Image: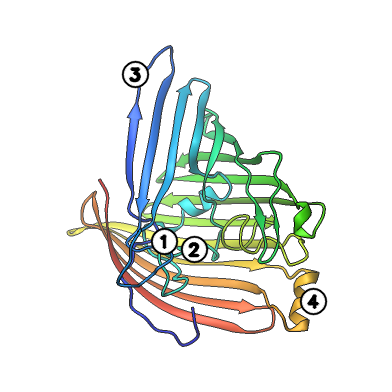
Amino acid sequence: MADSQEGYRERVGFVPGWLAFNIKAPTMGGLDMGARISFCPTFDAKDVGKSKNSFGNQIDLREIFFTVDGNFGQVLAGKTLSLYQGGNILTDMTLWGYGAQGGIDGGGTPLGRIGYGYVYPQFNAQVRYTSPDLAGFKFAVGLYDPSVINGYTVEARETTLPRVESEFSYAGVFEGGSFKAWVSGMYQEAKFTGDSGLSGSVEAYGVAGGIQVLYKGFDVVLSGFENQGVGSLLMLDYDSLDASGEERDGRGYIAQVMYGFDNRWGKTKLGLSYGANIMDETSGDRQQRLAGTEVQIEEQNLFGVGAYHDINDHLKLILEYFYTDNQWFDGAGQQSHMVAVGTFFTW
């Protein structure tokens, strides 16, 4: 977003349009088999943004997978949301709202808290096993189609092994409420090819986790992550490496409180949240900054308040306010204010 820029947009929210088809086969030999495919279109073409003549709107095939369930747990094969930082994004109150703006003239979806409390886990091809519920404990591990690990000007694109992601979770109840805690992790290696001008390999790994407590209308979430070579915005993309191919380290967190109550007009939830992503400066980043050629972003902070009102089980009204504060390693900063009003229909 340019400094001093103002604007008005009518866009899809953080969750785009979502049309999903679920298939369930008859139970056979103690096995439940099913499949899911979902299409997620946006209002405007991703590369056109707010142009009136917007053709070729983005249709995102986010999910296509099948599952086999039994007393052993579940096996999933196909494309769906990744495990690493999946719990962090799914407990974010902006999931059904808008969140950070990103480029005001851009297309596609806004950011939610991508870059402001978590790194986007993406929907990836995977083979995943999830254990049955063991007195509240669950374990999941997946082998994923590996990704190129990118920097602004370099990339490690030779991948010979799958990426590994996992999650441990525990859910329980207490008088008047319930809670869930989770820890997730990931690891992947990628090598530089001969035409990259670099040699060797890079490693991307991280750990994330959080806890959610529901008690008498209150919904409290604390979550965070720490990783290397994963980047600050889109996982394994964009700024995971510096110009010399060194992995960047980063971390982030979210603190969120919501309160829900019934009223004569339906059900209302009020929310307050604060979160940030913080990156370390590598020696290569520092050299570029001192030479005046490139300065990396150090910290991205977002404060948000929101009101989410369910008129009924299918129709939601949303009002949000967000303040962002971005800081670079040379001391430069940029702030923004945004108000979002919208509605959401589910069936």
**Which one is earlier in the sequence, the residue at label 4 or at label 2?**
2
Residue matched to label 3: 26
Residue displayed at 49% across by 63% down: 113
Residue matched to label 1: 94
How many circles with numbers are drawn on the protein? 4
Residue matched to label 2: 113
Give me the C-alpha separation between circle 4 and circle 2.
30 Å
- Dots 2 and 1: beta carbons under 8 Å? yes
Residue 287, numbered circle: 4
Dot 1 falls on a residue whose secondary structure is helix
Mark 1 vs mark 3, foreground winner is: 3
Left or right: 74 with respect to 7?
right
Q: Local crowd at mark 3 within 10 Å, few (<14), some, or many (≥20)?
A: few
**Which one is earlier in the sequence, the residue at label 2 or at label 1?**
1
Give me the C-alpha separation between circle 4 and circle 1.
37 Å
Three-letter amino acid code of the residue under disc 2: Arg
The answer to which of 206 and 155 lies nearer the viewer is 155
- Dots 4 and 1: beta carbons under 8 Å? no
Dot 4 falls on a residue whose secondary structure is helix
Q: Tell me: residue 146, above or below residue 127.
A: below
Residue displayed at 79% across by 76% down: 287
Left or right: 309 with respect to 166?
left
- Dots 3 and 4: beta carbons under 8 Å? no
Mark 2 vs mark 3, foreground winner is: 3
Three-letter amino acid code of the residue under disc 3: Pro
Three-letter amino acid code of the residue under disc 1: Thr
- Dots 4 and 2: beta carbons under 8 Å? no
Residue 75, numbered circle: none
